[in-house]
C-alpha cells in the first residue's frame, strides 16, 4: 500500500490530482486535504509515501508546508511534489531549495505527474 | 376532446425496435447502410420517421384544448410531469381531419427541452430497417415535409422530415 | 436525411473526455461560477476601498489575486486557452497590485470588472462553438486592453535588508508574503515574530485564536509551522506579524495565548521620521549576517526589548478592518452545502408529483365517503390524507425555503453596474438599497436581474440629469436612485425610484404618435400616456448609447416580467423623478390555484393573484362604454369574460355568474367564469411544443384525476384589460 497526501484548496483541482494519481494502480491510497492546516492534521495520522501540494492556499502556503515536513524528523524523508500555478523561476527555486523533490507547473500533464510520482515512490533507500 | 376507453399507457416501442432487430443479424457495415424507421398510418397511407427521433409512443388520452392555437395544434397532453403540445399530423400535411380512433397513437418526439413535441397519427405499424439504396428522393410533397420515399411491402412509404415539419410549425407561431 | 441523422446522433453526445474528467468538468463549471461570484463581490469592495483614503486591505487584494489564480489554474487544466489566458492577464495585474508593482490607481484595475464579466460570459458559451469564437475575439481585445493599461513596474528599494529574520523563515515566504513584509516596513510598522506551540491534534483552534487576536491590531504576514519540542505530539507556529502597536503592547494583548513575541523591527517615532525617510540602500537580501540597522530603526535582534511606554506612538487601531469573523467564516463554510439548482428543481418536481398524488388520494377518499357502504373507510382515508397533507406542506415549505435567496444578490450586481456607469459617464449618483433581506425564489431572482438592470440603467441614462443641470434646477448635484424591495402578500415588489427629470408625457405621446402607436385623436390620461413607454419600439430619446436604448426597452422588461407571472408599472412627475415598480410572485414552484370552469373547459388561476370571489346576479353587471362593470363596494370593477378572452363557449345557467377578482400591483380586474371548482396545489409546467408563446396562458398543470389544466396568465389579462379600458 502506498499512501499519497494531496494538499490543494481547489476542489476541482484536487479531484483531478486524485484521479490522475489513482491511475497509478490499485495499491495507491489517496488522502485529500483541502488546506495546509488540514495537511498538518493528516500528517501524524498516517505514514505517507508521497505528498503532493499546491503553493497558494489560504492558511499556510505550500512552501511553508514543505519547510515543515523537511524540518520534522518524522516526516523529513517523505518525497514532496509541488504542483503550482506559480511558474516563476523564483518560486521554483524556493520550492526546490526548501527540499521539494519536484516542481510541476499547472496545468500539469497527467502522465508527467504520474511518472514523477512513480519515480519518487520507487526511489530506493527512502528512509522508512 | 376526450379519447380512448383504454387507460393511457405507454406502448413499449423499445419492444418494437427489439423485434425488428431480431429479424436479422447484421454486421456493422450493414448497419451503416440501413435506416431504422418507425412507420405509421395516416388514413390508408403509410408514413415513417427516423426511429431515433421517437421518444415514446402513447395511447390516445385526454387532450386539453388550448385557446388561441393554430388549428393543427390539437391541444396539450400531460406526460409524466411534462405538458406537451400535440400536433395533428393530418392537418399539418394538409389531409382531411379525422376523429381519433382506438388505434390512434401519440408519438412523442425528442427535442431540446421546450422543443419536445407530440404528433397524433392514426396507427403505429412497425419499425422498418430499410436499406439505404431503396430510399429515393420525393418531389412535390405537401409543404416539403415528405422529402424521401422508400418501398416496403409493396407500398411506397413517405419519409417525413420531422425537422421541417416542426420548423414550419414554429415559424407559423 | 443521412446527414440529419448523424447530426441527431452527435447532438446526443456530450463532448466527452474520459469520464472522471467530464465529471470534474461539471465541478469545474460550478467552482468557477462560485469563484466568479466571490470575485465580483471582492472587486466591488476593492472599488470602494480604492476611492477611500485608507490603504486597501492587503487581504482583499490577495483574495482577488487568488481567485484569478484559481480560475487560471482551472481553465488551464481543461485546456480552455482563451479564458485561461484572460485569467492569466487578470492574475498578472492583480499580482502586480498585491506585490505593489502596479499602483491602485492604475487604469488596468478598472478593467478587472469587465474582464470578470467577459470570463463569465465565455464560460456560459463554452458549449457553443460559434459564440465561443466570438468570445475569443472579445478576449483577445480585452487582453490587449489590459496589456496596454499596465504600467511599467516602479523601482523600489529593498526594505527587507537589515531585518533579523531567520533565513529558514524567509525562504518559505512566497513572493507575495515578502512583498507584504516590505510594504509593512515601508509603512513604518513594527515587525515581530510570534511563536506558539500547540498540541498537534487541536492546533487550529488555538492558532486561529492567536491569529485573530493579532489581526485586531495588525497583519499576519506568514504562518510557518515547525516541529515543536515534542515533535510527535506538538507543532510550533511562527507568525511573522506587522503591527501599528509596539511589541510590548502586542505582548500584553497576546498574554492569554501563551505566545512568545520577539521584536524584529521597531517602528520609528514621528520625530525620527525625517521627511520621506530615505530608504536604506538596497542590499542583496536579508541574510542573517547582514544585520544593518537602518537609520530609522534601531534594532536589537533576537531579544525582547522593554522600552518605556512613553516612547511608543499612541495606540491606534490600524485601518485594517478588525474583522474577527475568520472563525465565523470558517464555520459558515463547513455548514453550507453547495447545491446545483437543477437538483433543487428535481426535488421540487418530486414534491410536485407527491402533491398530485395527494390530490388523487383526496379524490378517492371523498368518493368512498359519498357511499354509505364505504363511508367509514373513506373517513379513515380522509384522516390519513390530512396527516399526509400536513407533512407534505412542511416538506414543501422546506424545499421552497432552500430555494429562497435574498434580494441582496441582485443588489450587489446592480451596485457594480452603477459603479461602472458612474465611472464612464461622470454623473453623480448615489445608489440606495432597502429591503436587501427580502427573499425570492432563486429562479425568479435570476430572471429578474436583466429587467431590473435595464430599469436602473434607464434611470441612470435618461432620468438623471448632469450635475450642473441639477444644480440649475435647484436640486442637490448628487442624484439618488433608491431601490427597495418588500413583500406584499404573495408577491415581492421592487421599486426603482429616482429623483431625476421625470418622464415627459408630451414627449412620450409625440414619440408614440410618430411611430403610429397612438392615434393623434386618442384621448389618453396621464397614466395611460406613461404606460406607452412599455410599447414595443418606443424610446423617447433618439440617441443610442452603450448602456440602454438600442430599440429594446421597457417592452422587453414588461414581457420578461409577464413570463414570470409578474408585472411592471411606472409613475412619474416631470422635474421630480420617476418610480418603476416590478411585481413578481415569491415563488414559481408550487402554487395554490383556483380551478374554474368555463363551458366544458377548466382553467387554473394562481391564488396569489386572486383577491376574492363573488357570486353575482346578471342584473348586477352594469354596462359602460361597451365594457361590463361591477360595482364592488363603491368602486367600479372592470369585468372580463374568460370565455370571450379565449373564444370559448360559455355555459352559465344565465342568471348568475362567478366573478374572480384578480389583483396585480395596483390593478384590479373581475374575471367572469361559469363555475368554481375548488383549490389545488399545483406545479406550473411550461408547455412544450412548436408554439412557444400562448398569449394569456402562463403554463399548464397536471391535476390528480385527469390530464392537463391550463394556467391563466393573470398579468396578461390584467394588462390587456387596462389597455382596452384606455381604448374605450
Image (cartoon, rainbow, N blue to C red):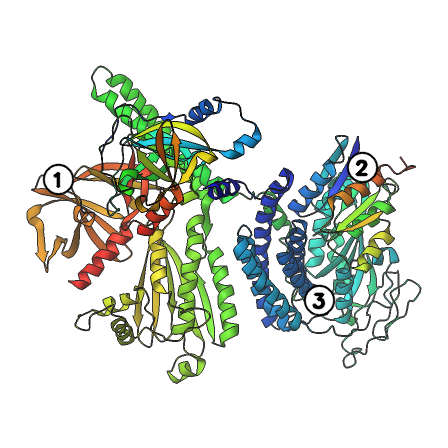
- Please provide percent x and percent y for residue C442: 45, 49
Front one among C241 and C500 = C500
Q: In the drawing, what numbered circle is on residue C96?
A: 3
Q: Are marks 2 and 1 on the same chain?
A: no
- Please provide percent x and percent y for residue C207: 73, 49
For the residues labelled 2 and 1, the Cα–Cα distance comes to: 81 Å
* Residue at (23, 70) in percent of width and height: C526
- Please provide percent x and percent y for residue C24: 62, 43
Number of numbered discs visible in the structure rendering: 3
Q: Residues within 10 Å of mark 2 (few under 14, many from 20)?
A: many
Q: Is residue C335 left or right of residue A62?
A: left
Location of residue B90 by image quarter: top left
Placement of C287 over or under A37, stated as above or below: below
For the residues labelled 2 and 3, the Cα–Cα distance comes to: 37 Å
Front one among C159 and C459 = C459
Front one among C263 and A100 = A100
Q: Is residue C477 left or right of residue C75?
A: left
Q: Are marks 2 and 3 on the same chain?
A: no
Residue at mark 1: chain: C
Residue C179 in view? yes
- Please provide percent x and percent y for residue C319: 65, 66
Comes first in the chain, label 1 or label 3: 3
Q: Residues within 10 Å of mark 1 (few under 14, many from 20)?
A: some
For the residues labelled 1 and 3, the Cα–Cα distance comes to: 76 Å
Location of residue C675 by image quarter: top left
* Residue at (80, 51) in percent of width and height: A64
Q: In the drawing, what numbered circle is on residue C651?
A: 1
Q: Which residue in the protein does label 2 denote?
A: A48
Q: Secondary structure at mark 1?
A: loop
Q: Secondary structure at mark 3?
A: helix
**Labels 2 & 3 near each other (Cβ < 8 A):** no
Amino acid at each position: 500500500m502506498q499512501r499519497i497526501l494531496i494538499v490543494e484548496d481547489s476542489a476541482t483541482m484536487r479531484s483531478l490530482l486524485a484521479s490522475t494519481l489513482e491511475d497509478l494502480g490499485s495499491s495507491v491510497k489517496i488522502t485529500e486535504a483541502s488546506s495546509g492546516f488540514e495537511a498538518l492534521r493528516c500528517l501524524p495520522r498516517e505514514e505517507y509515501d508521497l505528498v503532493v501540494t499546491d503553493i497558494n492556499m489560504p492558511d499556510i502556503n505550500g512552501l511553508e508546508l514543505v519547510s515543515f515536513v523537511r524540518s520534522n524528523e518524522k516526516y523529513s524523508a517523505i518525497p514532496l511534489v509541488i504542483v503550482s500555478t506559480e511558474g516563476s523561476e523564483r518560486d521554483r527555486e524556493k520550492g526546490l531549495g526548501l527540499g521539494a523533490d519536484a516542481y510541476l507547473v499547472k496545468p500539469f500533464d497527467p502522465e508527467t505527474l504520474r511518472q514523477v510520482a512513480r519515480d519518487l515512490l520507487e526511489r530506493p533507500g527512502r528512509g522508512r | 376532446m376526450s379519447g380512448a376507453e383504454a387507460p393511457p399507457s405507454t406502448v413499449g416501442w423499445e419492444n418494437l425496435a427489439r423485434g425488428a432487430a431480431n429479424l436479422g443479424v447484421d454486421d456493422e457495415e450493414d448497419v451503416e447502410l440501413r435506416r431504422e424507421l418507425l412507420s405509421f398510418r395516416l388514413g390508408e397511407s403509410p408514413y415513417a420517421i427516423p426511429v431515433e427521433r421517437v421518444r415514446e409512443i402513447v395511447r390516445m388520452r385526454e387532450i386539453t384544448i388550448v385557446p388561441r392555437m393554430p388549428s393543427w395544434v390539437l391541444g396539450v397532453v400531460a406526460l409524466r410531469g411534462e405538458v406537451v403540445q400535440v400536433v395533428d399530423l393530418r392537418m399539418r400535411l394538409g389531409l382531411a381531419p379525422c376523429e381519433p380512433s382506438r388505434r390512434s397513437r401519440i408519438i412523442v418526439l425528442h427535442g431540446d427541452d421546450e422543443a419536445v413535441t407530440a404528433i397524433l397519427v392514426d396507427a403505429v405499424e412497425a419499425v422498418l430497417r430499410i436499406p439505404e439504396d431503396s430510399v429515393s428522393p420525393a418531389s412535390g410533397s405537401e409543404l416539403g415535409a415528405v422529402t424521401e420515399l422508400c418501398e416496403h411491402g409493396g407500398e411506397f412509404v413517405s419519409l417525413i422530415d420531422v425537422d421541417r415539419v416542426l420548423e414550419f410549425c414554429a415559424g407559423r407561431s | 436525411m443521412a446527414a440529419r441523422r448523424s447530426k441527431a446522433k452527435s447532438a446526443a453526445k456530450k463532448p466527452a473526455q474520459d469520464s472522471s474528467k467530464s465529471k470534474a468538468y461539471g465541478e469545474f463549471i460550478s467552482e468557477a461560477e462560485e469563484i466568479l461570484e466571490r470575485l465580483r463581490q471582492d472587486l466591488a469592495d476593492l472599488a470602494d476601498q480604492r476611492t477611500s483614503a485608507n490603504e486597501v486591505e492587503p487581504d482583499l487584494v490577495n483574495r482577488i489575486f487568488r481567485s484569478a489564480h484559481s480560475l487560471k489554474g482551472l481553465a488551464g487544466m481543461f485546456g480552455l486557452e482563451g479564458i485561461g489566458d484572460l485569467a492569466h492577464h487578470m492574475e498578472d495585474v492583480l499580482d502586480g497590485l498585491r506585490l505593489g508593482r502596479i499602483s491602485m490607481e492604475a487604469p488596468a484595475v478598472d478593467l478587472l470588472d469587465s474582464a470578470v464579466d467577459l470570463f463569465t460570459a465565455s464560460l456560459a458559451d463554452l458549449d457553443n462553438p460559434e459564440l465561443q469564437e466570438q468570445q475569443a475575439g472579445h478576449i483577445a481585445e480585452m487582453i490587449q486592453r489590459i496589456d496596454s493599461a499596465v504600467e511599467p513596474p516602479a523601482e523600489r528599494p529593498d526594505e527587507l535588508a537589515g531585518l533579523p529574520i531567520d533565513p529558514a523563515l524567509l525562504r518559505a515566504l512566497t513572493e507575495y508574503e515578502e512583498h507584504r513584509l516590505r510594504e509593512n516596513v515601508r509603512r513604518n510598522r513594527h515587525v515581530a515574530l510570534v511563536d506558539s506551540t500547540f498540541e498537534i491534534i487541536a492546533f487550529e483552534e488555538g492558532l486561529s485564536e492567536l491569529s485573530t487576536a493579532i489581526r485586531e491590531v495588525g497583519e499576519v504576514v506568514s504562518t510557518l509551522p515547525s516541529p515543536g519540542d515534542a515533535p510527535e505530539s506538538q507543532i510550533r507556529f511562527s507568525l511573522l506579524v506587522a503591527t501599528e502597536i509596539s511589541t510590548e503592547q502586542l505582548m500584553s494583548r497576546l498574554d492569554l495565548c501563551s505566545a512568545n513575541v520577539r521584536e524584529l523591527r521597531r517602528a520609528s517615532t514621528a520625530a525620527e521620521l525625517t521627511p520621506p525617510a530615505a530608504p536604506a540602500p538596497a542590499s542583496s537580501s536579508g541574510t542573517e549576517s547582514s544585520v544593518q540597522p537602518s537609520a530609522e530603526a534601531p534594532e536589537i535582534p533576537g531579544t525582547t526589548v522593554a522600552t518605556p511606554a512613553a516612547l511608543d506612538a499612541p495606540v491606534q487601531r490600524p485601518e485594517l478592518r478588525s474583522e474577527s469573523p475568520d472563525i465565523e467564516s470558517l464555520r459558515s463554510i463547513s455548514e453550507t452545502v453547495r447545491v446545483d439548482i437543477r437538483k433543487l428543481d428535481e426535488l421540487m418536481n418530486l414534491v410536485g408529483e407527491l402533491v398530485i398524488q395527494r390530490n388523487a388520494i383526496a379524490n378517492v377518499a371523498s368518493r368512498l365517503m359519498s357511499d354509505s357502504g364505504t363511508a367509514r373507510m373513506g373517513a379513515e382515508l380522509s384522516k390519513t390524507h390530512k396527516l399526509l397533507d400536513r407533512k407534505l406542506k412542511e416538506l414543501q415549505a422546506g424545499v421552497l425555503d432552500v430555494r429562497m435567496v435574498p434580494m441582496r444578490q441582485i443588489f450587489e450586481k446592480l451596485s457594480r453596474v452603477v459603479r461602472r456607469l458612474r465611472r464612464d459617464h461622470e454623473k453623480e449618483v448615489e445608489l440606495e438599497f432597502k429591503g436587501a433581506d427580502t427573499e425570492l425564489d432563486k429562479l425568479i431572482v435570476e430572471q429578474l436581474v436583466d429587467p431590473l438592470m435595464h430599469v436602473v440603467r434607464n434611470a441612470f441614462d435618461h432620468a438623471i440629469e448632469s450635475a450642473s443641470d441639477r444644480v440649475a434646477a435647484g436640486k442637490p448635484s448628487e442624484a439618488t436612485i433608491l431601490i427597495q424591495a418588500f413583500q406584499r402578500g404573495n408577491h415581492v415588489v421592487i421599486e426603482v425610484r429616482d429623483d431625476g427629470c421625470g418622464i415627459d408625457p408630451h414627449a412620450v405621446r409625440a414619440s408614440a404618435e410618430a411611430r403610429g402607436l397612438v392615434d393623434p385623436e386618442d384621448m389618453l390620461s396621464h397614466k395611460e400616456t406613461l404606460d406607452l413607454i412599455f410599447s414595443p419600439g418606443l424610446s423617447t430619446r433618439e440617441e443610442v448609447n452603450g448602456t440602454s436604448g438600442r430599440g429594446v426597452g421597457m417592452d422587453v422588461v414588461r414581457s420578461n416580467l409577464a413570463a414570470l407571472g409578474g408585472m411592471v408599472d411606472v409613475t412619474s412627475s416631470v422635474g421630480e423623478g420617476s418610480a418603476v415598480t416590478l411585481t413578481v410572485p415569491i415563488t414559481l414552484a408550487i402554487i395554490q390555484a383556483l380551478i374554474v370552469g368555463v363551458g366544458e373547459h377548466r382553467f387554473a388561476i394562481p391564488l396569489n393573484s386572486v383577491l376574492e370571489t363573488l357570486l353575482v346576479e346578471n342584473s348586477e353587471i352594469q354596462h359602460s362604454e361597451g365594457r361590463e362593470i361591477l360595482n364592488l363596494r363603491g368602486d367600479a370593477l372592470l369585468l372580463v369574460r374568460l370565455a370571450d378572452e379565449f373564444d370559448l363557449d360559455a355555459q352559465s345557467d344565465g342568471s348568475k355568474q362567478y366573478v374572480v377578482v384578480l389583483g396585480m400591483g395596483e390593478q384590479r380586474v373581475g374575471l367572469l367564469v361559469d363555475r368554481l371548482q375548488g383549490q389545488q396545489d399545483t406545479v406550473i409546467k411550461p408547455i412544450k411544443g412548436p408554439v412557444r408563446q400562448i398569449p394569456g396562458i402562463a403554463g399548464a398543470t397536471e391535476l390528480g384525476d385527469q390530464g392537463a389544466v391550463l394556467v391563466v396568465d393573470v398579468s396578461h389579462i390584467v394588462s390587456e384589460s387596462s389597455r382596452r379600458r384606455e381604448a374605450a
